[in-house]
Image: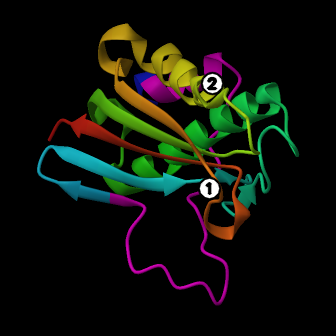
């Protein structure tokens, strides 16, 4: 077991299965696209343990509180890690988180997107440490997201051969 897998266990986290696309949904892209020493990570919602898309669905500020959004973003980090691991084989190959981009489906006037996406960033830094886990980040509010996701997060990491 690698260092990051051990750290996940220490913290009481389990990765879900890699994301399973619902029947009838066509996505002409991959969730993780490795190019040289970079892995580009497409926007992710939360996953259920079996890899099914777990939402949440709706808007922050009307359907969900900031704390619920933070918790969901934390779980989105686990879904991202599951898909990255499926693509590169070992999370210890990640030598740097370079950027995170969080999108929050926001009710009018909702302005705590940055606090929601902290759920993702906090877990990444806790798992990888401040050197490898440190990343640039944006968190924006949107009027809607695909499939009515409440939160979608994409990222980019640097990987070792």
Secondary structure at numbered mark 2: helix
Residue closest to the far right: 63
User: Which of the colour schemes (rainbow, by chain, secondary structure, one colour) is used?
Assistant: rainbow
Left or right of 108? Residue 35 is left
Q: Which residue is drawn at 14% across and 43% down?
A: 37
Q: Residue at x 77, y 51 (%)?
A: 56
For residue 133, what is the image quadrant?
Answer: top left
Q: What's the distance in space between the residues labelled 1 and 2, CA to CA?
A: 16 Å
| Closer-to-camera residue (142/25) | 142
Q: Is the magenta stretch mostly helix, strand or loop?
A: loop
Q: Which mark is residue 5?
A: none
| Mark positioned earlier in the residue sequence (1 or 2) | 2
Q: What stretch is highlighted in magenta?
A: 4-32
Residue at which label 1 appears:
17
Secondary structure at numbered mark 1: loop
Q: Residue at x 62, y 31 (%)?
A: 113
**Vertical order, 147 against 7 (above or below):** below
Q: Residue 9 carries which label?
A: 2
Residue 96 lies in the magenta stretch: no
């Amino acid at each position: 077991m690698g260092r990051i897998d051990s750290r996940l266990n220490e913290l009481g986290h389990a990765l879900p299965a890699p994301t399973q696309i619902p029947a009838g949904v066509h996505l002409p892209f991959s969730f993780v696209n490795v190019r040289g020493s970079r892995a580009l990570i497409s926007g992710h919602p939360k996953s259920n343990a079996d890899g099914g898309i777990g939402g949440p669905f709706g808007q922050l500020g009307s359907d969900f509180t900031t704390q619920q959004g933070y918790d969901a973003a934390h779980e989105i980090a686990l879904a991202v890690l599951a898909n990255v691991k499926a693509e590169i084989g070992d999370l210890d190959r990640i030598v740097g988180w370079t950027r995170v981009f969080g999108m929050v489906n926001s009710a009018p006037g909702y302005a705590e997107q940055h606090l929601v996406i902290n759920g993702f960033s906090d877990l990444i830094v806790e798992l990888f440490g401040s050197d490898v886990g440190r990343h640039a980040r944006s968190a924006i509010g949107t009027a809607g997201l695909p499939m009515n996701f409440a939160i979608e997060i994409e990222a980019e990491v640097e990987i070792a051969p």
